[in-house]
Image (cartoon, helix red, strand yellow):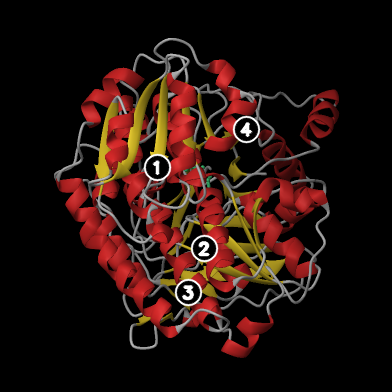
Amino acid sequence: MCGIIGYIGMQNASPILVDGLRKLEYRGYDSAGIAVKNGDISIHKKIGKVADLESILPKKIEGTCGIAHTRWATHGGVTDANAHPHASEDGKVAIIHNGIIENASQIRKHLQSEGVKFSSETDSEVLVHLIHRNLEGGSAPLTAVRKALRRIRGTWGLCVLFADHEAIICARNGSPLVVGIGEGESYIASDPHALTPYTQRVIFLEDGDLAELTPGDIRTSRMDGSAADSTVTTIEETWAEAELGDFPHFMLKEIHEQPEALRHCITGRTLGSEGTGKLGGLGLSPRELQRISHVRLIGCGTALHACQVGRLSIETLARVPALAHVASEFRYNDPVIDSNALYFAVSQSGETADTLAAVKEIQLKGGRVRGVINVVGSSIARQCGSGAYIHSGPEQAVASTKAFTNMVAALSLFAIQIGRARTLSRAQGRNLIKSLNAVPNKIEEYLANPGPIAEAVALLSKAKSVLFLGRGVSAPVAREGALKLMEVAYIPCLGYPAGEMKHGPIALLEEGSPVVVIAPNDSHRNKTISSIHECRARGAKIILIHEEGDSIAEDGDISIPVPSTDSMFTPLLTVLPLQLIAYHTALALDCDVDRPRNLAKSVTVE
Ligand code: AGP
């Protein structure tokens, strides 16, 4: 979603703002803009990447107070005029905004009827005109913003700059904002890790909070004017700025980081002798684990696919009902929440609005929800209050890879832990823990010799559409492979349970259609072979992901072996060729693999 960075202090603002935009670019990158106060407010903004904005910036922009923004378009096309910041007609007020204003068109019409001239198509612009009018009416900056927001229905992460006041006013409702505390300096950002080069002391604004930033002072309050109980948090885990290093793209780097990332996720979370997992952050005793009536896992996109793998592992090992839900559907289907159930919110960014909304709905109805999150201190992590961080490290590529494998690993650890609190034997648990601990090396082994990826890319890069098939835990892997190829190579893909293919998608097949089949040597293997034959009978070309040494290799036109592991952990290996295939196909098609069109790394609007 949109990236936000602001600074007020003694230093020149623009270098800090541009550096922050670079760190936030992965959140959204249709356009970028900067506003700096130096007497008047100077605004520079442009479609494209942060580098495109930098190319039009003056060598030096005087001013020690400013705000900046990277945009992921929700209302209004990708144009220079629609880029943020937006200014009042006299240029005395500038705003940057992340969120959606649901009643923007009514407010726009009203303002226009009173002679206000708009310069963009965006919903956000109504805010700057409302604030400006309140200022003109004699309100102080904080009051002017508060009054304007009272007329808004929707979500906001908002920063406001004033030509005639030495302050930045910020407000949060639904879109993340975090204030950084410096020595005589104050910062604001949409992501805590954009602040860690400057300060580790932050205040996470909550929905309904406002903050008035002046050099060296931060005052927070609520929309009703009451005091906000803002606590200062020290960000322990500073996210070392993820540099590309020797890799050409973040996606490839993060694919290759999976062995190390997985070690970070599982180390210290297994009790080999007892044969169990140990996710202490869940705060659930064996007795509580025993009493869980059922488990529901909620996520979007790749996180949803991890949920779908996790639910199978939980049912298999703990014999407790488990379901995965699309977060964006969950809240709006008026779910029945069982206080004896356990809910998981799974999210890499911890900022996905659909997932955050589902968490709030569950809590509102008395449900227990735990986070399985990558970004420490993110909104969903804080809303849940407890859970398990997956420790993937910064994931910058829009296409999620190492977060998927770590989400699956964390949920597998939970499956073992709840299983051992129930019917899973110590011996079974010990075997599983041993197998899980061996997976990072197996990933390394595969990545060192990934097999005929180029042949698969040659076939897929010419495809009109691609069908991905799998059964059991491989069905969500099929969906994940389809999502990867779609989002980075823009090829229409369908990930489907293999057994279901004959009930419809088989109609897509014609001579030469590529079908990717994930077929580890598990209980579904032979049925999957039948699905392969059904596809072949219609002229399909089979790209087969299979376990090393399995004779099933003969059933593929392009067969890609991965190391064997326990059937529950095969997604951690069978997903790897799918990630590489997506990456290399995107390159073959000259797509922007780290910043795919229309996408954002973290979707903080519903
Ligand atoms: C995955 O490659 C996509 N970028 C997207 O589907 C993503 O998984 C989804 O938006 C959920 O994001 P989250 O894990 O940060 O909640």
> Which of 237 and 360 lies nearest the eye of the viewer?
360
Point out residue 35 in the picture as x, y percentages from the top left corner.
47, 40
Depicted 198 relative to depicted 47: above or below: below
Frontmost of labels 3 and 1 is 1
Residue at label 2?
313
Q: CA distance from mark 3 to mark 2?
A: 8 Å
Disc 3 to disc 1: CB gap under 8 Å:
no
Name the N-terminal-most of marks 4 and 1: 4
Identify which residue is drawn at 54% across, 44% down: 301
Classify mark 1: residues with Cα within 10 Å, few (<14), some (14-19) or many (20+): many
Amino acid type at image mark 2: Ser
Residue at label 4?
74
Frontmost of labels 2 and 1 is 1
Quadrant position of residue 48: top left
Identify which residue is drawn at 32% across, 38% down: 552
Name the N-terminal-most of marks 2 and 4: 4
Query: Is 261 placed left or right of 131 in the picture?
Result: left
Identify which residue is drawn at 34% across, 60% down: 393
- Which label was assigned to residue 416? 3
Classify mark 2: residues with Cα within 10 Å, few (<14), some (14-19) or many (20+): many
Residue at label 1?
519
